[in-house]
Amino acid sequence: MSDKTLTPEQAEFQDFCRAWLQENKPAPHPTPLPQAAYEVTDPSHLTYLTEWQAKCYEAGLIASDLPKQYGGHGMTDCQQIASNEVRSAGVPYFINWIGLGMAVPTLLECGTEAQKETFLPPIFSAEHIWCQGFSEPGAGSDLASLQASAVKEGDQWIINGSKVWTSLGHFAQYMLLLARQDKNDKYGGITYFLAPMDQPGITVKPIHKMTGESGFNEVFLDNAIVGDHLRVGNVGDGWKVAMATLTSERGAGVGVGAVVGESPMAVMQQVIQLAKDTRRNGQRVWDDPVWRDRIVKVYERTEASLYNGRRARVKALNGGAMRIPLQGKLTGSEISQSLHQIALGILGLKSSLYVGDEHAPANGKWPLGYMNTYTGTISGGSSEIQRNILGERVLGLAKSK
Amino acid sequence: MTTPKDFGFDDDINMLKDTYAKFLLEQKTTESLRPSLKGTEDPYHGSPRPAYFDTQNWQKTVELGMHAVAIPEAQGGIGMGLVAATALAEEIGRYALPTPLSNNLLAAFILRQAPTDSAKQLLEDMASGLCAALALYGEDGSLEADSTDVQFSDGKLLGSAWYVTDAQKCDVLIVAAQCQDGIDLFRVNRTDPTVELSPDRIVDLTRDQARVAFHATDAEPLTEQGQGSRCLNLALPALLTLTAADIAGAAEWQLQATADYAKVRHQFDHPLGFFQAVKHPIVDMMIATDETRSLVYQAAAAFDFDPDDAARCAHLAKSSASDTAEFCANRSTQLHGGIGFTWEADVQIYHKRQMHSQFMFGDGVWQRAKLAELL
């Protein structure tokens, strides 16, 4: 049944998405996929996921609302519908999540016409995988202290330095790169580039996470070359452009497609089911009122996030355009972490059984997922940085630094 | 989700909310309350606090038609739904207003569930400005809305209702009583000589509360054959949502007041908000408030547009609101430091209102127990 609040065109598109996803849902890959796009390291997973994203793009589920000249499908107010349907269809995630979630909004807001026309279509089709080169070993939460240098030589820039936590760096054709053209100007000394990864000056070395998985990397830039036509925005405007990128990363951007796997509510429902299915001390965990209260509290917050998303678009009720969107990344990641902690609690000692153990519930999905929630609470500006941003930009409190 | 994308906040309701908010802003509500508190501060030696009733404010509320928002048109009201009432309740909370309007809104949603002529008559009387309060609780303040200690037999009410809010402001009481067939609701004149009012000394300065004893009181049935429980259960989502909306409005005030204070108060050469130990909990107040507000709007919209989902959404809203009330009250006082702990600061007025609201119609734990049954 279609949502009653949709226009006839939207309702028709929603029906199309549902039918299409049903019909084209790919058979599972012979080996299980990692839980999220940023953990993919197996090349056969890459091929499988690239094909899936290309197919979705072709069907109109990606770049639905964007103009045709940029490779979009030229529809109106349909992307949200497609993204919702993709999220709830139980299909694989989109591999090119940095491209879709960060490169696209950055290019749309700050890119030249030529950059948009060249780079957007292959992002949608996953022909070009993108990675992000912002953080450095010495520049994490204090991102603007980054040191990678950019020196102009003719119509090229020579880049030296190193980047860290670079998800998908091992597969990427392009990197969203911040580098410093002026050492003496902290914010105004940064320029934003689209750096080709396939060149001798770039070396990618994997980093292993606490889960044992890889997926992110350290990237060494040793006289790497980037053409001046691949600069986004003016020289010295990199920080401003980066803010556009980070705003999307933090859940405030327009969004061109679903990049995550399961929706928070789908995971929530699994945890409720887990509590109903797990017996300990002679009863179902769900029948223990203490556990039930903890579970339902997270259910309440998950629902609140959903309706926050809706309220953000209601001008009379949102308390300002950025107040709710800027909370999205912080609350989403923290709620997910609480939920996974509860899942481990429901399982008790069974949660000690990890991926690959034949007795591990859901093949170790819960302890693995729990550890991976720190990706959400640390990357893209840690929860502590998010609270600074919210306090300063939304509530007008004094800047902490 | 079959509720409207704007949660049913159409132009009419936005205008209603703005009109009422503007009116309350002009009323300087906490300032007007202050004189009535003089001499009552000391709980050991001070004089008992009289029920504060700004009759002019109530008169103006009636003139504006706010009292009749949720009364059906057929009974002389405006005939709007819970979304409109929620908009008003949120403003009442934001201004910590001692007003019988809250209970009149609750009463309207209860009476709307009763098919009797007597219930319609009471709605009509309320549309003309008659003020109603709810006498639903027994001594244990049990969280089930229909657990009353009052008995009805041979046409008379016997026993006591506890925790009756606005008891001293109202003209009539809607009383839940045990009858042969279950629970029914009755209309009682507050000034009836067999009705004995014992005002409670309560923490909350913005509400009055009393124990009401019925000594063989004549009562007019508003429901019949034990249909009172059904009415209360059908109205419960509205009662929860309106109480949660009051909390959301007050929490937003607490958030803004605390953020404002953190901008002007300086220590260690910086405004307090510079320090993350202060900044971050203020942000957490905003997050809690926003979650509650979204759930409140959704609960109101569900009641009006998607009734099958109304109970779940209302329990969600009050679950969130009760926890937000506790959290925002706690942080608002703590982050104001010494001044927040004084009688002089308005922070205490809101803090105590939240302490009261938190437990009205069930705290967070009870809401979640109810929710669990639906999951």
Image (cartoon, helix red, strand yellow):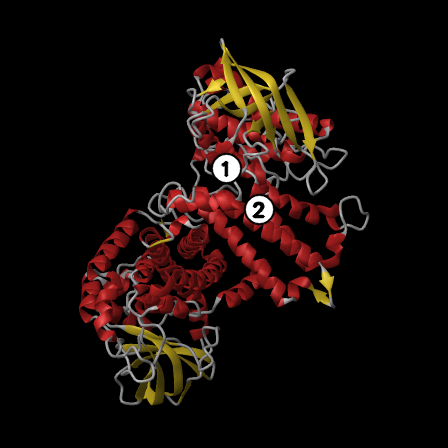
Question: Which numbered dot is residue A142?
Answer: 1
Q: Element at badge 1?
A: loop
Q: Amino acid at mark 2?
A: Pro
Please identify the residue farthest to the top as the structure is shown: A154
Subunit that carries the residue with mark 2:
A
Residue A14 can be seen in this image: no
Question: Which numbered dot is residue A192?
Answer: none
Residue B105: horizontal and vertical position, in percent?
Answer: 32, 65
The residue drawn where x is 71% and y is 57% is A347
- Viewer-nearest of discs 1 and 2: 1
- Report crowding for label 1: few under 14, some 14 to 19, many 20 or more residues within 10 A (C-alpha): few
Q: Nearer the viewer, residue B174 or A376?
A: A376
Question: Which numbered dot is residue A264?
Answer: 2
Subunit that carries the residue with mark 1:
A
The relative height of residue A132 versus residue B332 in the rendered view (above or below) is above
| Residue B230 as seen in the image, left or right of residue B263 | right
| Residue B205 as seen in the image, left or right of residue A271 | left
Residue A56: horizontal and vertical position, in percent?
Answer: 59, 28
The relative height of residue A34 versus residue A365 in the rendered view (above or below) is above
The residue drawn where x is 43% and y is 30% is A187
Quadrant of residue B85 within the rendered picture: bottom left
Q: Element at badge 2?
A: helix
The residue drawn where x is 75% and y is 53% is A352
| Residue B292 as seen in the image, left or right of residue A157 | left
